[in-house]
Image (cartoon, grey):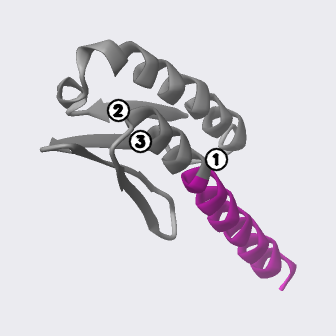
Amino acid sequence: MIELKLKNLKEVEDSYRNEVEQICEEKSAYFHELFKKYNKDLVLEIIFDHSSSTYKVSASINLKSKKIIVAEEGKDILTIVTKLLNEFKKTVKRRYELERKDYEYKRKR
């Protein structure tokens, strides 16, 4: 089970807030499917930070073996969030496959 936490969403401009929230919900559906049989409850945290004209967005998840953190920075919030979640998806999937491979290797021994 995955829980999505959006932190500091109030730092995103009002005009983009609903779109950003919707993008995060859509992308988190992939993680729900990926970790359907995972035996640990996970929290997907997405943290927003706005300073002057740039946005900094980071995403983190704490798996069994490692905590994964990915961050992006830029001026357009929608592109940053999309790019961040796509990169985060690749990283998490790679780590999850390594955990599965390690588990199967240990099980065969």
> What amino acid type is highlighted by mark number 2?
Lys
- Above or below: residue 26 compared with residue 36: above
Instruction: Determine which residue is flagged by label 1.
Output: 38
- Quadrant of the snapshot with the N terminus: top right
Q: Which residue, as the protein is rendered here, is positioned at the far bottom? A: 109
Instruction: Determine which residue is flagged by label 3.
Output: 43
The one nearer the camera, 78 or 36, is 78
Q: Is residue 93 magenta?
A: yes
Relative to residue 31, is residue 61 drawn left or right? left
Instruction: Determine which residue is flagged by label 2.
Output: 5
Q: Are marks 3 and 2 in contact (CB under 8 Å)?
A: yes
> What amino acid type is highlighted by mark number 3?
Val
Residue 79 location, x and y as percent? 49, 39
The one nearer the camera, 46 or 2, is 46
Residue 75 location, x and y as percent? 33, 44
Q: How far apart are the two marked residues, 2 and 1, measured between alpha carbons?
A: 19 Å
Q: How far apart are the two marked residues, 3 and 1, measured between alpha carbons?
A: 13 Å
| N-terminal label among 2 and 1 | 2
Residue positioned 71% across, 34% down in the render: 33
Q: Image quadrant of residue 77?
A: top left
- The boundaries of the magenta stretch are 87-109
Residue 104 location, x and y as percent? 81, 72
| N-terminal label among 3 and 1 | 1
Q: Are marks 3 and 1 in contact (CB under 8 Å)?
A: no
- Quadrant of the snapshot with the C terminus: bottom right
Judging from the image, what secondary structure is the residue with disc 1 in?
loop
Q: Image quadrant of residue 100?
A: bottom right
Q: Is residue 7 visible?
A: yes
- Above or below: residue 43 compared with residue 94: above
